[in-house]
Structure formats: C-alpha cells, structure tokens
Image: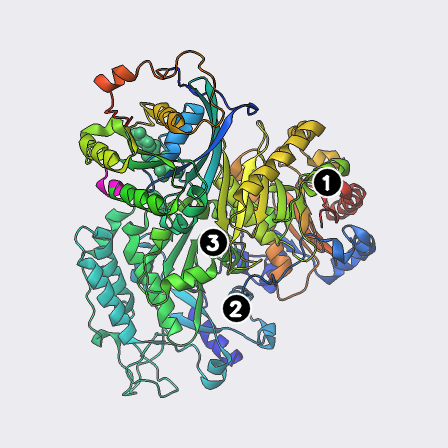
Amino acid sequence: MSGRPRQNGPAQAKALQFKLVLLGESAVGKSSLVLRFVKGQFHEYQETTIGAAFLTQTVTVDGVTVKFEIWDTAGQERYHSLAPMYYRGAQAAIIVYDITNRDTFERAKSWVKELDRQARKDIVIALAGNKFDLSNKRMVEVEEGSAYAQEHNLIFMETSAKTGDNVSNVFVEIAKMLPKVEPKPNNNGQTVRIDDNQEAQNGGGPGCCSKN
Amino acid sequence: MGDEDTTSVRSTTNGTIPAPSSCLPEEAIEARSSSTTPTPHDQVTENLPSTSRLQDLEPQSRSRLCAESASDHFVSRPRSNASDYASNPRSPRASIDLGLKECSGESSQNGGESSHNATPAKLNLDIDSELAKSLLNGSLTSVDEVELVVEDNEDLIMESPSVHQKEFSPEASSELSAEFAGETGVPGEEGASSGAGSGGSVVSELEPGAMVEPVGRTSSGRDLQLVTPGDTVSDDEGSETVSEVPLPVEDDSEELGAQEYPPEWYTKQKHVFIFSEAGKPIYSRHGKEENIVGLYGVMQALLSCVQDNSDDLNCIRSSDRLFVFRCHPPLMLVAVSDTTECEEQIARQLKYVHHQAVFFLTQSHLARLFKNRHNYDLRRQLTGLPKFFNGIIEFVEEEHSFLLESVQCLPMPQSLRNEVTATLLSNRCPELVFAIVLYERQIISVVRPKQYAITPQDLHLLMNYVQTGSTRGHGEKWAPCCLPDFNDGGYLYIHDSYISETVNVSLVLITNEREQHITMINCKQRIVEQMVAQKTMDKLEEIISTPFLSSDTKIPHLRHFVYKSKSSQQLVSPEYTVPYNSDEDRRSLHTKYCHVYDKLHHSDQKMSIYYDIDSRESVVGYLMSSSEIYCTFSPFVTRPVALNNIDKLLKWIRREENRFFILGSGVY
Ligand SMILES: Nc1nc2c(ncn2[C@@H]2O[C@H](COP(=O)(O)OP(=O)(O)O)[C@@H](O)[C@H]2O)c(=O)[nH]1
Ligand SMILES: [Mg+2]
C-alpha cells in the first residue's frame, strides 16, 4: 500500500499537522483502528480506553507528509461531557460504528449531528462501519451507511481493524480532503492514486464507497 | 454495659467459636507460647522485660533515621483546602479499632475491655448453617455459629441494658424478600431466583431457634429480634417471631444456587463485593455479579437490619471465614476472607476499594447518581473499570506500603534523583499541579506545590491507575481522576505515559484544568527531551537492572526487611530474594509482616517488639518513636543476635538514607 503509514519518529519539520478525533460508542473498535493504523497491530482483548489516548502518525499523500495527532476517546457515557474538548479544535473526525450492532449506528448519527452543531465548520468527517470481517453478523447494511454518509457529506468506508481492511484508507482519504496550506508543486501529476489495491477492495473486498 | 454483656456473650460462645489464631489477644498468646495451643506458627511475645533489654537501641534508632525537617515531607497529610474545590466533609467513622481485639476477647478474660470508650456491643446470632450457606451458598459448611460484632452507638449502650439484643424489622426483611421475589420474576435470571431463596432463608433460618427476648424499649411491637442461643421465648406481646413474616422461600434455591458458582469460586481466599444501598450488585472480585445477585441481597439484608437500629454491622466471624462489612454510602462493601488478615486491615482494604470508585467518579458524583434513584445500576458507569478494582485489591494484599501507610521510593543515588526532580521542576508549566515519576509501584520523584501534599493512599491509587491501565503502545493517556484524600469532590486531570522503551518508568502529570491536555503533552515532550539529552533514562534503566538486595547491607542472617520512616511516610525494603522465590513464599512472608504489624499496632497491650518465629524464618517487628522496622532472619538466629543485627541494620539505613528516601526536594 502506498498510503502505508511510516513508523512514528521524530516529526519531520515539513509535515503538516492535523488534529483528528475518533468518536463512537464503546467497543465499536476505535482504539483498535488506531492501533492498526499506528502500529499495524490488533488485539483481540483491546483494553477499554479510560478518558482518552493521544497518539501520532504520519502519512504521505500526494507527496505531502501529513502528521495526524490522534485523540482516541472513550465511549463511556461518563466521559461524554469531555468530548467537545477533543473535537472542538479538530480538523478531522472519524465516527465509528460496529456493523454488527444497530445501536452503535444510531449513536454514530448523533455524533454527526453533534459535530455539525459544535465542531469547526470545515471539519472533515469520516464515517467508519467497523468489524467488516464480521459481515455475516451484519445488522447495518452497507447501503444504509453509505446513503447516510452521502446525505451528510461524509467520507464513508467499512473497515476491519482485525484484518486491516481499509484502515489506512480512511486516514488517507481524510488526508486528501484536508487543506494543504503549503501545497506542493505538482511533483508527479495532481491526483495520484493513493491506493493500488483500492480497486481490489472495491471489487471483492470490503464495501468501500469512499465519497469523493 | 461492658462486663455483663461480654460475659453473657462468652457464655454462649465459649468453646463454639475457635477464634482464629491471628486475633487472639496477647494473654492468649502468652499462654500459648508458654505451653499449649497449636498455632499455624509459634509466636513469642516479649513484653517489658525483653523490651527493656532493647532500651539501648532506642536512642540511636530514634536519633535521626528519617528526621527531616517537618516542612520537607512530600507526604504530609493534607486536608485539601484547594480553594477552587468545594470541600466535601466526610463523615468520620470510628469503626476501625473496634471489633477484632474485642471479639478475640472471647477466649480469655480481658480485663482491659471496659476501659474502652466505645466497646462494641456484641450480639450473637444463632444462625445455623443455612445462613452460612446462603452467604456463601453452601461453601462454608462448617459455620455453625456466627458472631456478629456491631459497632454500637453510645445511646444504645446507655439505653439498652442488654445490647446484644438487636432487632430485625420484619417489615424490612419482608420488603427485601419481596424485592428478591421481584427479581425472581425476571426471566432468565437464574442467579436472582436462587437469590430469592437464599434471601428468604436468611430471616427464616433465624426462626427455628426463635426464642425471643424482650426488647427494652417501645419501638414498634413488630420488631423482630436476633436470637441469642439459649435465650428463652418471652411473653412480650410486642415481639413476634419470624415465622409470622410471610417470606417467599424457594426450596430448590440451594440446588439452583449450587449450580451457579463454579467450584473454584468457593476456594478463593478473599472475595470482595460492592453493592448499592438497595442491594444492587456493583462489583464482585470473583465471578460475575449477575450470577450472584442473591448473595448481594443477603449481605444487604444483614447490613440493613443492623442499620435499622442506627447501628453498623462491622464484622461476622465464622469458624473459617471473616466477613467484614463497611458502608461508604452510597456504596456498601463486603469482604469475605479466609486469610489471616485482621478486621482492621481488611476494613482498610475496603476503604481503598471505595476510594477506587471515588477515583473515577468522585464522591459527590456517586452521591448524585444515587440521589432520587435508589435503584440505580452503577455498573453502567463502570465499563472498563473492574480491572482497576481487581488491581487495587491485589495491591493492598501484596504491598508493604499499603500495610505501613507509606510509599516506597526506588533506591538510587541522591544525585540521580535530584537530576530527575530538577528536570521536572525546570519544565514545569503554571497549569501543572503535581509531576510524578514512577517505576511500577515505587516512586522516583515527586514535584508538588508547597501548599499541597499528596498522601500515600492517593499515590497508591495513582500507581494502580498507571499500572493497571497500562496502555504501553497505545500512546499517552489523559483522563479525569479524583484523588480522594486530596479532594473527593472534584476531578484532577491526569496525563500519563511511559517514558522508557524498555522499563516501566512512567511520567504522571496532574493539572486541575481540564482543557490543558495539549499543554501537558507539550510539557511531557520537553521533559522527555531533556531526559534524553542528559541520558537520565539510561541511568534509571541501569538502576532498575540492579535492584536493592538485603545482601547489600552485609548483615548476617538477614533475609528481608521493611523499614518505615514515620515522619516522611516512606519505606525501604529490598527485593525478595532466596528463599522467597515463588509468589506464594512472598505472600506468606508478607502475611507474617501483617501479623506482626497487627500485634504491634492493634494489641491492647503496648509492645514495642514482637517476635514471630517458626521453622521457616524469624520475623521481628520493632516500633520506635519515629520509625518502625520488620526484619526477617533465618530461623535459628537467637534473639540477642537478631536484636544486635537490627541495631546494625538501623545504623546502615541511616548511613544510606539519601538513597532510599526523598528528602525534601521537589517542592515549588
Ligand atoms: N472482529 C473484529 N473485532 C474488532 C474489530 N475492531 C475491534 N474489535 C474488537 O472489539 C472490541 C472493542 O474494541 P476497542 O478498540 O476497544 O473499541 P473502542 O471502545 O471503540 O475503542 C475489542 O475486543 C476488539 O478486539 C474488528 O474490526 N473486527
Ligand atoms: Mg477505546
């Protein structure tokens, strides 16, 4: 994958920095998505997040290095009142639900509404239907997620933190949408296809209907 | 009250309750050591004669092992008066020093008892094995007689000549039973239905003996009394036996219940339960709460029927288990233990468990949740938190620092500690309140404002939070947490992260401003950069790879020790080495320290030295004015040699104290 994140290291001076927040009900797989994206790992028994966790990861998109400062929040209701401090200044958000659990989809919708009201107007939002590997237990159809995303102008993907499907794609798609303050002069054409295997995934793999 | 009642209690219990060896009064121990009763390990007390031999030790030891100037302690006991928090007065409970010594008085005449101001009332419940079964659902088969130790209030002492009579309110019990019955109705809740049975049987099992004594007051005639064996039925019209209370009792409850718990469940050394005042399960250390709903009901019933008498149930002792009850409203906590820990220690452990809940929710939020919602299911708030309760229970069972109400510092050259502290101080930002560097359960450095201290208890909670919530590989954590001793009504915001790739050294930054997460991240970044530049981390890793061992002291026969400096509330203790290789060996040595500690601190008789000698080792505890020490020697060391070695050790520690203790830096 060309969108593959590089290892965490001393931040490059040139990198653009973006604040990204993950929101969604408890246990939908927010921490797992982040862990997959940042470390390439997956834990069957992912520890429940207490409060929030902060991680960073960089990706290169269109020749531009983007550093994500990621706030992985806890989904429990006792931390709900803290959520605004993470999304308030955020340029991007991933709202996650679990495709095997309808309630989490409803919760995701309410997060979308909350962000519409309270977050920056130019925030880039992705809706991620996670646990794609469990699609035999699916309770939310792809079309439903994708239609909702279309309607609200969100990036949409179904992901699996377990298999890694589409995980970095979500971040890369977000990175593409973010304003490049210092746009790189065309290195090699403008719209470089980020993901070689995106086709493959669109075909047989996870339902990926990235808006855009 | 006092004598008469105690006597009557004795008369009913003598010979039937084998008092656990760990809580025999001094007299009994002396008696044993001079001849008789077999005990798990032979114990020898030395009272004044031998202590006076030690007098020569006192002066040196008192000299200055730990005496820094009072202003230097980073852990003096603070009462948070942080102006930005509403201070939240907590109701004082004076229950801790009641109970154990008193109830151990059963096996011998204890003349000193009447001198206690608040001698607990005693009441005996002739609760036959059915109750015990309900309590542990068949596990504690040998419980034939149970003694309840109740913390009494003065009114009761004065008012009631026979305080051992307590009343069960049938209304309350039947309400309870009805509640169980209600829960039985919930489809699919097998545990609940078994609970209904057990719940019902608590009260009804009182009935066979149903011999009721008159109550010396005019409360509702329907009051139901606990029954003292041997008492006779009175004619008092007001009294009713339990049999008249309609109770839904399910006959098959026991079989049902028996299936609920896996066999391991019964053999656990210590159970800990939390439930609400309405009896709703909140936490169980072993097994899923929802499977033992009935048990919660029984415990709640026991607590509430004593509370109905404006009294508190503290402890029930059966032949092989100690049941310790503590109310920290809105939470009720119960420990069921077959360890040798005494009631005071277990009660302190329960207090930690309560503090663990406060740590995440604050006392005021807890109270708010239950206000007007008596039946609130707190588990909704506790997603992801049970492991922290498990963690704090392990902590209190294993740590000398819990036992001695102190903290342990990682031994290192003073220059290195100063380097860490200076790094913290120089990168401090105005929003930062505390900065702490931890190595697992030991402290490397603490930086704090002059006006606020942080107690050992709060530090223990922090250590548990950092260690149990370890997200190595998952970035830096940021969460609102409450330090109950600092202020149990408000949140602080805690940033913590590992700062070494190879060892578990973590940096904890604490602020009182909730939006300062970015500031804390930047602060951490600066601290880490400076540490890297100074190679501080390398030096720390080096220190950690060569732990402090008792052999470093070069004192012969010394296997292990724990030394506490009282004024600074810090302790020093070497790593366990041979022969304490297994967890079990370590646990058993720790248990001995607990026992010796208990002897020195909770005996009626003032002692400053206590020996606990058996074929495995000799443990000696020694109290001094500003410090205390517990030493483990090989078993054949004679007492004079042991004392002489303790003397040497105290001098050695004094010489090395800069390595072991944080002596007054880190205050800004
Ligand atoms: N099968 C499957 N399980 C997942 C996936 N993502 C997360 N999980 C599991 O779901 C549980 C909750 O995940 P976690 O990342 O803690 O969720 P969070 O509370 O949203 O952070 C964990 O047991 C994960 O192992 C996924 O894509 N597929
Ligand atoms: Mg999480």
Which amino acid type corresponds to the residue marked 1 in the rendered image?
A: Ala
Question: Which dot, 3 or 1, sits closer to the camera?
Answer: 1
* SS for dot 2: loop
Question: Which dot, 2 or 1, sits closer to the camera?
Answer: 1
Q: Which mark is residue B624?
A: none
Q: Is residue B134 left or right of residue B401?
A: left
Q: Mark 1 — residue?
A: B422
Lower sequence index among marks 3 and 1: 3
**Which residues lie in the magenta part?**
A99-105
10 Å crowding of disc 1: few (<14), some (14-19), many (20+): some
Q: Residue furthest top?
A: A188
Placement of B17 over or under A54, stated as above or below: below
Tally the marks: 3
Which amino acid type corresponds to the residue marked 2 in the rendered image?
A: Arg
Q: Is residue B632 visible?
A: no
- Asked if residue A100 lies in the magenta stretch, the reply is yes
Q: Are marks 3 and 1 on the same chain?
A: yes
Residue B88: percent from left, percent from top: 52, 66
Lower sequence index among marks 2 and 1: 2
Placement of B271 over or under B171, stated as above or below: above
The Cα–Cα distance between marks 2 and 3, rounded to whole angstroms, is: 16 Å
* SS for dot 1: helix
Residue B160: percent from left, percent from top: 44, 84
Please report the residue visible at 58 percent of the width from the left and 53 percent of the height from the top. Answer: B457
Query: What's the chain of the residue with tag 1?
Result: B
Q: Which mark is residue B353?
A: 3
Q: Is B603 in front, or is A130?
A: A130
